Image (cartoon, rainbow, N blue to C red):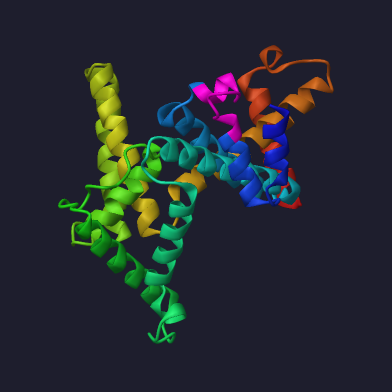
Amino acid sequence: MADDSDEVYAVPDGLPRLVAVMRRLRDPEGGCPWDLEQNFASIAPYTIEEAYEVADAIDRGAWDDLKGELGDLLLQVVYHAQMADEAGHFDFDAVARGVAAKMIDRHPHVFGDASRDKSADQQTRDWETAKAAERAARGARGVLDDVAVGLPALMRAEKLQKRAARVGFDWPDAGHVVDKIAEEAAELVEARDRLDADARAEEMGDLLFVMANLARHLGVDPEDALRRTNAKFTRRFAAIEAALDADGRRPEDSDLAEMDTLWEAAKAAERAR
């Protein structure tokens, strides 16, 4: 076992060593029992979690944290690639070669002789055209075929609508979407008193779906917008707790009127900064 560890340290530092570390952790003859028990499905939730932790570090401007979170996310890629290698599907180098080739193919204005005199919007349209061709080559027939089911629901709603819009299935402007929001909100209010729990959930889903559509029309990332509002709510509620704690109390010792006053004070303090 010591010899195996020495072999890992002999690998050049950086990415090659990380790949060697993961190979060692998955070694049936002396690897980590927990790592050996894992599979693609059991690791996937960690991959999603690490991606969100990267986004959180960026939102907070915590650059030291970001370095660590990017390492954790990279570990997830190495982990999946190692399991794929063991199963005979592909290895990490194939992953790296594939994404490098894709970036080259999708940037002919950088790596080829295509004109660089394009706006960012035109480059985005070219990117989408290239992705559509790739989907067709993979045999994806339906417009929505490969929008990942595992995405967060709000993000997937936005992507489904964006994909449908490319073939003309879209409201002509944001005003029509706002009208649809009012219609869906009214249906939800009606469902509150008249329908069962499943029907209410369906109406709520319809409203959230249209809200995601409005975000797309306004050029807003709905997942990011909600994440920011979650952070804002957390900050302001923490201010309520701090104000009550200064008086030796907790939120359950207060009432809605007082907490609402403290909320408005926290909001005013944020805007004054």
Q: Look at the image and tell me whether residue 254 can be seen.
A: yes
Image location (x, y in percent) of residue 263: 66, 33
Check if residue 258 falls in the magenta segment: no
Residue drawn at (27%, 47%) of the image: 146
- Write the residue at 54% across / 35% down: 49
Q: Residue at x 45, y 26 (%)?
A: 42
Residue 270 percent across, percent down from the top left: 71, 46
Viewed as shown, does residue 146 lie left or right of 100?
Answer: left
Task: Give the camera-side residue of 145 and 32.
Answer: 32
Query: Which quadrant, please, contains the N terminus?
Result: top right
Instruction: Please indicate whether residue 272 sits to the left or right of residue 194 in the image.
Output: right
Q: Position of residue 154 (x, y in %)?
A: 39, 41
Image position of 168 with respect to 41: above or below: below
Which of 267/208 is in front? Answer: 208
Q: Is residue 120 left or right of residue 1?
A: left
Q: Which residues are magenta?
A: 24-36
- Where is residue 28 drawn, in percent x and y? 53, 24
Residue 183, placed above or below residue 102: above
Q: Is residue 168 above or below residue 257?
A: below
User: In this orientation, which residue lies closer to the viewer: 254 or 58?
Assistant: 58
Q: Can residue 219 be seen from the camera position used here?
A: no
Question: Going by the picture, which residue comes out furthest to the front?
Answer: 3
Report the number of numbered marks: 0
Residue at x 45% of width, y 55% of height: 220
Q: Is residue 47 left or right of residue 271?
A: left
Q: Residue furthest top?
A: 253
